[in-house]
C-alpha cells in the first residue's frame, strides 16, 4: 500500500493506475477507521480496480473547535486497517497543503437547511469544499459514502450533479455493532453508561419501523414515539428527530414518498447521529437502516 503525502505524488500514482486500465475507487475519511469505513472500501472494490482512501481531519468542517482537537488520530492503526481492507493508496495531506491561502468554498442550498445543517453552522460547506478538492486531486470514477451520514451523502450526490463532477456516488449501508449502535469514530468518547444509553437511538428507529409496518404514516405519531424512547436514555440534549423527503431533505408531515427519518442526540458531550431510509415498496414501505 502506497502512502502519499503530497498531491503530486498522489496524482502520479493514480495516473499510472489509470494508464494501466484501472478504474479508480475513492473513500474519503477523517481516519480513526472502523468497520464502517472498511465496508465502504469493500463496496468500492466491487466497482473499481484501484482503491484510494484519503485520511484528513478536515478542520473547516468542525463547527466546534474542541471537537476538532479531540477528534481521535491514530494513523499507524489506520494504515494497518486500510492495508487489510485492500486499499492501494492512502492520501495523507496536511492542513497547510489543503488550505494555504484558501478563499474558495462550495455550498449546496436547500438539502443542507434541515437536520444537522440546522445545528452545525458551516459544517457542510467545509465538507463539500474538501470533498470537491479531494475529487479534483484523485479524480475517481466512483466514490463511496456511508448512509450513516445521510445528509452528507445526499448533498454530495446533489453537488456532483449540479457541478458536473465526473464521479459516480454510491451510498453504502450503515454498519452497526452487534447491539445496534451505528459505528462511528465518536463512539470511543462514550463512557460505559453513555454507551449503554445510546442504544435508544437505534431502538427508536426500530420502533419507527414497527409503526410504519403497522400502517402509521403520520410524522407526529412516529417521531413522538421515537422521542419517548430516546428520552428514556437520558441524552444530554436532542438536536432533532425528523422525517424529511429524500429528494430535498425538507420536512414531511406524512410518509408518502421516499423519505428519511433521522436523529441527532448528545450522550455526555458526544453527538451521535443515525437514520433510516424509507422506500416505497409493493403494498407499503421498506425501511433501510
Ligand atoms: O464523512 C467524513 O468522514 C467526512 O465528512 C469526509 C467526507 C471525509 C470529509 O471530510
Image (cartoon, rainbow, N blue to C red):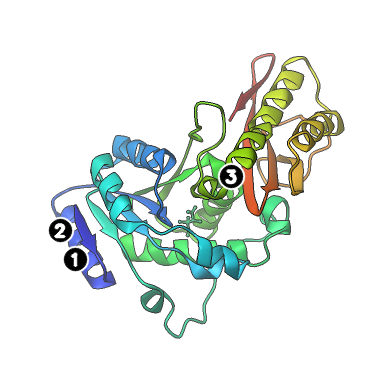
Label ID, residue 138? none
Q: How far is mark 2 from mark 3, CA to CA?
A: 46 Å
Screen quadrant of the C terminus: top right
Q: Position of residue 131 (x, y in %)?
A: 46, 61
Residue at numbered disc 2: 16
Could you give the CA–CA distance between mark 3 and mark 1, rounded to whole angstroms? Answer: 44 Å
Q: Residues within 10 Å of mark 2 (few under 14, many from 20)?
A: few
- Where's residue 219, x and y in %? 82, 33
Residue at horizontal 61 percent and vertical 63 percent from the top: 123
- In the figure, residue 101 lies in which quadrant? bottom left
Rendered image quadrant of residue 44: top left
- How far across and down, in percent of the image, does residue 230 sit? 75, 36
The disc placed on residue 191 is: 3
Q: Secondary structure at mark 3?
A: loop
Q: Is residue 179 above or below residue 67?
A: above
Q: Tell me if residue 119 comes above or below residue 205 in the rendering.
A: below
Lower position in the chain sequence, tag 3 or tag 1:
1
Q: Are marks 2 and 1 in contact (CB under 8 Å)?
A: yes
Q: Nearer the viewer, residue 223 or 191?
A: 191
Any mark on residue 12, and which? 1
Mark 3 in CB contact with mark 1 (< 8 angstroms): no
Where 237 falls versus 103 (above or below)?
above
Amino acid at each position: 500500500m502506497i502512502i502519499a503525502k503530497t498531491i503530486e505524488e498522489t496524482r502520479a500514482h493514480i495516473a499510472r493506475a489509470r494508464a494501466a486500465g484501472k478504474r479508480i475507487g475513492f473513500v474519503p475519511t477523517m481516519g480513526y477507521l472502523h468497520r464502517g469505513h472498511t465496508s465502504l472500501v469493500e463496496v468500492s472494490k466491487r466497482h473499481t480496480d484501484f482503491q484510494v482512501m484519503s485520511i484528513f481531519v478536515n478542520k473547516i468542517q468542525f463547527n466546534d473547535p474542541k471537537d476538532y482537537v479531540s477528534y481521535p488520530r491514530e494513523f499507524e492503526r489506520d494504515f494497518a486497517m486500510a492495508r487489510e481492507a485492500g486499499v492501494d493508496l492512502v492520501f495523507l495531506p496536511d492542513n497547510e497543503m489543503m488550505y494555504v491561502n484558501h478563499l474558495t468554498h462550495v455550498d449546496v442550498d436547500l438539502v443542507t437547511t434541515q437536520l444537522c445543517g440546522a445545528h452545525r453552522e458551516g459544517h457542510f460547506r467545509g465538507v463539500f469544499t474538501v470533498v470537491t478538492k479531494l475529487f479534483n486531486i484523485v479524480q475517481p470514477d466512483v466514490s463511496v459514502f456511508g448512509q450513516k451520514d445521510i445528509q452528507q451523502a445526499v448533498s454530495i450526490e446533489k453537488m456532483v450533479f449540479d457541478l458536473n463532477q465526473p464521479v459516480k456516488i454510491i451510498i453504502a449501508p450503515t454498519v452497526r455493532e452487534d447491539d445496534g449502535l451505528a459505528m462511528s469514530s465518536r463512539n470511543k468518547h462514550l463512557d460505559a453508561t453513555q454507551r449503554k444509553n445510546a442504544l435508544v437511538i437505534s431502538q427508536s428507529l426500530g420502533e419507527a419501523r414497527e409503526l410504519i409496518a403497522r400502517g402509521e404514516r403520520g410524522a407526529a405519531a412516529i417521531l413522538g414515539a421515537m422521542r419517548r424512547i430516546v428520552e428514556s436514555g437520558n441524552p444530554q440534549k436532542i438536536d432533532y428527530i425528523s422525517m424529511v423527503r429524500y429528494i430535498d431533505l425538507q420536512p414531511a408531515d406524512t410518509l408518502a414518498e421516499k423519505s428519511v427519518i433521522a436523529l441527532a442526540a448528545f450522550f455526555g458531550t458526544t453527538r451521535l447521529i443515525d437514520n433510516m431510509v424509507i422506500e416505497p415498496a409493493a403494498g407499503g414501505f421498506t425501511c433501510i437502516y
